[in-house]
Amino acid sequence: MIKKLFLFATAAIFIIACNNTQTASSEQTAAAEPEVIAVMTTADFNTHPEDFVGKEILIEGTAVHVCKHGGKRMFIIGDTTEVERIQIKAGNEIDAFNVELEGSDVSIVGVVDELRIDEPYLTQWENELKADNPESELKIHRGEEGHEHNEGDPNAEFEQIDAYRAQLAEQGVDHLSFYSIVAKEYKVKK
């Protein structure tokens, strides 16, 4: 009788433990999925991008630049006279953006990302330049006109590092934030 009771109790504990593991796993999966936000304009995004970090958004704009070196970045603007471009990075689901997208109206679904530049970041970037590391992921690409002319020019990168340090000092902050969208999917609007 005690043996049967022991086996029954052991089986019950095992079943309860399995159910708890499935529930915890489901909750973790749900927590890992980004929150979806409705269609947003580039003006809305540029007003407070920090509010959207880690959230999935759908944004529309005009592609004004696609990086010719690999097509991993695209920059969009809205239909107003905005100066700020929004950087769109090709996520895991996208091989590359095609240069022919330039001038097209696009709709992008992606997750907002924040790049924080602080003194340790700048020091690491500087050290990689000094070590002649051409594969550095620390380079900051904002899609400015003529940026292709400075590709691979360490002096231009050292100047950029100095400019960021000056900006940190002028603003009296410990970091600068740059926001982008890591695209999951995109389509050309017709």
Image: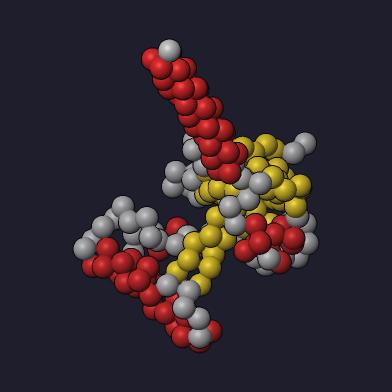
Query: What residue is at 37 percent from the left and 68 percent from the top?
Result: 121
Query: What residue is at 74 percent from the left and 60 percent from the top?
Result: 44
Instruction: Please provide percent x and percent y for residue 127.
Output: 26, 68
Give the vertical position of 47 relative to 17 (above or below).
below
Q: Residue furthest front?
A: 1
Give the vertical position of 149 relative to 29 (above or below).
below
Residue 139 seen in the current view: yes
Instruction: Please provide percent x and percent y for residue 172.
Output: 51, 85
Q: Is residue 72 left or right of residue 85?
A: left
Q: Is residue 137 left or right of residue 41?
A: left
In the rendered image, the quadrant that contains the C terminus is top right
Instruction: Please provide percent x and percent y for residue 153.
Output: 33, 64
Q: Is residue 62 left or right of residue 123?
A: right
Which scheme is used to colour this image of the protein? secondary structure
Query: What residue is at 72 percent from the left and 48 percent from the top?
Result: 37
Closest to the observer, 33 or 161: 33
